Image (cartoon, grey):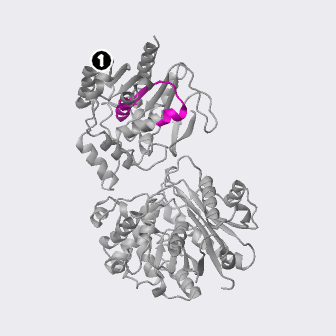
């Protein structure tokens, strides 16, 4: 990478239930939070990046109008929940190319108070393959459940191992005052919660909340003059993965491509990663992502997540905010992966702080594993 | 129907009213007749009072709101106690600058209304209690069922105990979408808040006129609790609605409105 780029400001909207707000309002409040944090104002923003559940084709244009903003660079790429992770990479490219200087990345949604059925809804029917799949009733959770069942079939992975992920995320959420679900749960609780799509139980699935957030990306040089310690973008990757069920393989996911590129461009190894923020739409998402990113071999994910390895104090703590399984999941969650990673690297996470964290990985997944999905990976580091 | 958000201690609270809409931070016009504030039941929301608001609006100033974490108000958990809920209602009344009013409470809302009236008698002109008596008698198995729902061990289903036998389909069609608007955690918290609550010792102090509206098919324990209230509160009287269960606002909105309307007329005399 040429000129270095950094995250200068982040803001996670504290709401989890906002029936009195619109998604635009949540984005605007988040923008104010992130800009104020680093000492910038809306007038400093010249790049606008956004995607959303409630945003149509002209969504970013409408958002610019809502914010009374005239950016010289806009990007409305929507590759599902991972979009905002990819936006950081896109922003870095634009900043390095001189196309903008201060990029604002936004997400906001009232998925919960609008009673959106996200995981149990059918697959959107506009792509050519959907016409052959939708009539059989595949849902979002169904796509993930197939991958989970396949993993169990091939490698003997057990529901208890998937449950370990949900239990760990809840333990982290209990340390996060803003998390939606904070009451600790046990493996038994996960296994005895009702089955949503076999083999995934209710507590294997992310929650649905309202919420949003904002990221401010600029050059490392500029970020060093701002109010908060900058967090440097060390490397990144993005990928979109197969259209057809089972091709090339249900367990081969986009993270294998985006992760390899992120590690290559960052020039770091897996051992350098102090903690990771892994998109946890479902417990199986985390397990497959860890394997595909190369933290363990295919089939070893079940053992990898056991014995406290992914909890605070473990070898690779994951999703310290409680993740989508327990803290918040307003439909698309990628932005929160980056926000928590930045806060952790700045050392401002209190009870849930990973001590001495210097390097982090954030990986977002969008769409449905087993079919059409995307992956975006960032490797972030403290400014040294 | 006009709805607006009122911020009570920072909680976005959905308020339903009638008459002209008003700008944010401007209270609706409540100059007509009696000010009537509706309090919904456990896990409910103010949507159940839509017909009653319509029916009273020509002569009075009816208002209804969603408790925190219910319906379309902000918040994630039940306030957790009847007294907290009464305090919240009082702060809403302060915020709106309402004159002394009539409280109409359904089920748990009826307990909240009693707690409000016993603590601030000077602010309450009358009470209407729908399927609510002197004390709560929440069966332990209801609480257990909703605990299981909050833990994902049971699917949430519209509780049918509250409806009279032979309830027509349209009533369920109205009640079901309202039921879905509240997180099961809030209902669970409400039921626990109601558990063991009693005003029986204090009811002799109740000065405001009180109308108890009870469905013919109300559960026996609840009917007994209403009779206990009538024994202790000298100002209370009872009407029984034939054919109704506990969900009177959904089951018989017209009959409910008529009873309230008549009660309000008597207050004025």
Residue A141 in sight here: no
Residue sitting at 26 percent across and 27 percent down? B223
Name the image quarter holding residue A100. bottom right
Quadrant (top left, top right, bottom left, bottom right) of the N terminus of chain B: top right
Q: Is residue A374 left or right of residue B198?
A: right
Is residue A100 depicted above or below B49 in this figure?
below
Q: Which residue is mark 1?
A: B234
Q: Secondary structure at mark 1?
A: loop
Quadrant (top left, top right, bottom left, bottom right) of the C terminus of chain B: top left
Residue sitting at 69 percent across and 75 percent down? A222
Is residue A65 depicted above or below A263 in this figure?
above
Name the image quarter holding residue A167. bottom left
How far across and down, in percent of the image, does residue A201 sit? Answer: 35, 62
Is residue B182 depicted above or below B57 in this figure?
below
How far across and down, in percent of the image, does residue A359 sit? Answer: 51, 81
Q: Nearer the viewer, residue B14 or A137?
A: B14
Please give the range of residues in magenta.
B91-115
Residue sitting at 27 percent across and 33 percent down? B198
- Disc 1 residue crowd, few under 14, some 14–19, many 20+, Cα 10 Å: some
Q: Nearer the viewer, residue A263 or B164?
A: A263
How far across and down, in percent of the image, does residue B222 sit? Answer: 26, 30
Q: Please tell me whether residue B146 belongs to the stretch shown in magenta.
A: no
Q: Please tell me whether residue B102 belongs to the stretch shown in magenta.
A: yes
Residue A87 in sight here: yes
């Amino acid at each position: 990478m040429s000129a270095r780029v950094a995250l200068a400001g982040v803001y996670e909207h504290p709401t989890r239930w906002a029936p009195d707000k619109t998604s635009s309002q949540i984005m605007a409040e988040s923008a104010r939070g992130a800009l104020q944090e680093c000492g910038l104002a809306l007038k400093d923003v010249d790049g606008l990046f956004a995607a959303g559940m409630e945003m149509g084709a002209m969504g970013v244009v409408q958002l610019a109008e809502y914010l009374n903003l005239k950016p010289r660079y806009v990007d409305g790429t929507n590759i599902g929940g991972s979009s905002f992770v990819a936006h950081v990479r896109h922003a870095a490219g634009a900043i390095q190319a001189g196309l903008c200087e201060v990029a604002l990345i936004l997400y906001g949604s009232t998925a919960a108070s609008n009673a959106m059925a996200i995981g149990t809804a059918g697959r959107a029917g506009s792509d050519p393959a959907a016409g052959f799949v939708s009539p059989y009733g595949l849902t979002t959770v169904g796509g993930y459940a197939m991958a989970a069942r396949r993993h169990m079939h091939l490698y003997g992975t057990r529901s208890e191992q998937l449950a370990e992920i949900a239990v760990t995320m809840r333990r982290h959420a209990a340390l996060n005052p803003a998390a939606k679900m904070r009451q600790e749960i046990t493996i038994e609780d996960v296994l005895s919660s009702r089955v949503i799509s076999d083999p995934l139980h209710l507590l294997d699935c992310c929650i649905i909340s309202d919420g949003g957030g904002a990221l401010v990306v600029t050059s490392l040089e500029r970020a060093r003059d701002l109010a908060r310690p900058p967090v440097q973008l060390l490397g990144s990757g993005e990928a979109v993965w197969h259209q057809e069920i089972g091709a090339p393989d249900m367990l081969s996911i986009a993270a294998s491509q985006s992760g390899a590129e992120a590690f290559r461009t960052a020039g770091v190894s897996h051992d350098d990663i102090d903690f990771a923020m892994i998109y946890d739409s479902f417990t199986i998402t985390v397990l497959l992502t860890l394997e595909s990113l190369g933290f363990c071999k295919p089939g070893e994910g079940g053992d990898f997540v056991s014995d406290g390895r992914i909890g605070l104090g473990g070898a690779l703590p994951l999703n310290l905010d409680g993740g989508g399984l327990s803290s918040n999941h307003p439909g698309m969650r990628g932005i929160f992966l980056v926000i928590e990673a930045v806060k952790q690297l700045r050392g401002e996470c209190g009870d849930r702080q990973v001590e001495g964290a210097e390097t982090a990985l954030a990986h977002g997944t969008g769409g449905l594993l087993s079919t059409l999905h995307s992956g975006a990976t960032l490797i972030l580091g403290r400014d040294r | 129907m006009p709805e607006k958000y009122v911020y009570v201690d920072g909680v976005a609270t959905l308020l339903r009213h009638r008459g002209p809409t008003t700008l944010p931070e401007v209270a609706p016009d409540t100059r007509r007749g009696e000010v009537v504030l509706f309090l919904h039941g456990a896990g409910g929301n103010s949507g159940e009072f839509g017909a009653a608001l319509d029916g009273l609006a020509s002569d009075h100033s009816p208002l209804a709101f969603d408790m925190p974490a219910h319906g379309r108000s902000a918040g994630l958990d039940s306030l957790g106690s009847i007294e907290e809920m009464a305090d919240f209602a009082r702060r809403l009344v302060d915020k709106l600058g309402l004159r002394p009013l009539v409280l109409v409470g359904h089920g748990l809302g009826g307990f909240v209304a009693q707690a409000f009236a016993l603590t601030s008698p000077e602010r309450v002109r009358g009470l209407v209690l729908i399927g609510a008596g002197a004390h709560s008698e929440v069966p332990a198995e209801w609480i257990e069922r909703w605990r299981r729902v909050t833990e994902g061990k049971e699917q949430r289903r519209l509780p049918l105990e509250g409806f009279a036998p032979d309830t027509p389909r349209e009533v369920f069609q109205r009640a079901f979408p309202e039921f879905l608007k509240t997180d099961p955690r809030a209902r669970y918290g409400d039921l626990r808040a109601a558990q063991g609550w009693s005003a029986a010792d204090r009811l002799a102090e109740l000065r405001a006129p009180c109308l108890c509206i009870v469905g013919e098919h109300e559960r026996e324990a609840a009917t007994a609790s209403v009779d206990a209230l009538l024994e202790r509160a000298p100002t209370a009287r009872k009407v029984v609605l034939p054919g109704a269960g506990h969900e009177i606002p959904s089951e018989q909105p017209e009959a409910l409105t008529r009873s309230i309307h008549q009660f309000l007329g008597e207050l004025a005399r």
